[in-house]
Amino acid sequence: MSTPVNTLDTEPRDDAPDEDYAFEAVPRSGRRGFWAVGFVMLGFTFFSASMSVGAKLGNGLDLRGFVLATTIGGALLAVYTGALAYIGAKSGLSMDLIAQRAFGVRGSYLPSALISLTQMGWFGVGVAMFALPTAELLGVPAWLVVLVAGGLMTASAYFGIRAIEIVSFVSVPLIALLGTWSMISAAEQGGGLSQVLGTSDGMPLLTGIGLVIGSFVSGGTATPNFTRFAATPRSAVLTTVIAFFVGNTLMFGFGAVGGAFTGRDDIFYVMIAQGLAVPAIVVLGANIWTTNNNALYTSGLGFSNITKAPRRPLVLVAGVLGTVGAIWLYDNFVGWLTFLSAALPPVGAVFIADFLRRPASYEQGARPREGIVVGAVVGIVAGGLVGSFLPVGVGSLVAMLIALVCYLAGERVRHAATPVSAHAGEEVGR
């Protein structure tokens, strides 16, 4: 009997039972219903940073342009994340286990490192985005709010998908109801949406579409981490498409109206201007908590792939680092995080291409590739560099295309260099 390959799929685990299945496909017994996955995905897309994009769209486009940009950009974003959602639910695999199939076991360390570092960094930025305005409003030291908020967010991510579900079930309705009510009230005070968004700074529609895509195309690459718990691929795709249409569009709307009504790009300041201090803190905290939960959870899974250590201790380490460095990250690291994030859309593009080429490799019991898939690794490096130096949105689409070309070229070269007998054995191994 042969010795198993040393991967997450076969590595012994000392944290069993693992309800988050960091090391294996989620079995049927671990799948969750439509609403559970749907609320997690909605919470993922409810992020304050998207409001900044909404403010840019609201100031740059008129009402018609705003609707077109959010609709077209949202549709393209939903296609990308919906495809990843399908792969996650169909295979039951996390993003990192999918990477073992598409990039090879050792090659998967690169996308895992990219997603882990960026999500840990954005976790810290999110903590600071909540702590700084809240501390200013309450008149307390910012570091105190950072510690309390970072500790609570880390704790819920530590307990895994069940805790994330609970936070999402509470937070998503609060954000949607209070935020929508505030936005409508602000629009009425401003003379209606057509008046608020009646003028523009001349932003081209294509730029607006690119901003919508770029708002969440990097984070959306982690979609399989959550949709792998869906009962069926169909429900996974549906919840994801709804989340990226409804969730992102709401955030854009909050930001657009807020930018016009108060000159700020966050619903927090809109509600403060309306005399709603407590609801403002609740909405801001819930908004960031849901996304930070998903970010830290994703970070833990990625570090597990690299270290072969259990997810929970690594979530604690990432949470502590993100919390301690939150204000510094917010002040100094956003540009670097954006640079790192440019390489994530090419990762998702390679996932989709590999799944379409080799669907049998994602079935139950199929083994990951050994070593490094050179074309895939070259693709995310080349695509990431291009995505970093082209405008956001358009750059991400070009980066995906470059990654696909590199991956397919690498597969053609590998196939041509492999003996026919090995191809037959490879097909059997799939």
Image (cartoon, rainbow, N blue to C red):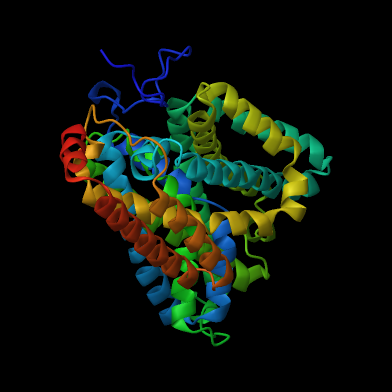
Vertical placement of 395 versus 415: above or below?
Answer: below
State the residue lying farthest toward the bottom: 202
Quadrant location of the N terminus? top left
Report whether residue 345 is seen. Answer: no
Vertical placement of 187 versus 313: above or below?
Answer: below
* 17 relative position to 127: left or right: left
Quadrant location of the C terminus? top left
Quadrant of res 113: top right
Residue drawn at (43%, 62%) of the image: 249
* 73 relative position to 419: left or right: right
Residue drawn at (26%, 36%) of the image: 91
* 48 relative position to 17: left or right: right
Residue 322: x and y in percent read: 68, 38
Residue 32: x and y in percent read: 30, 30
Vertical placement of 421 versus 2: above or below?
Answer: below
Q: Nearer the viewer, residue 136 or 304?
A: 304
Residue 13: x and y in percent read: 44, 15
Vertical placement of 410 versus 187: above or below?
Answer: above
Quadrant of res 235: top left
Q: Nearer the viewer, residue 333 or 204?
A: 333
Residue 163: x and y in percent read: 48, 27
Report whether residue 299 is seen. Answer: yes
Query: How many badges with numbers are in the image?
Result: 0
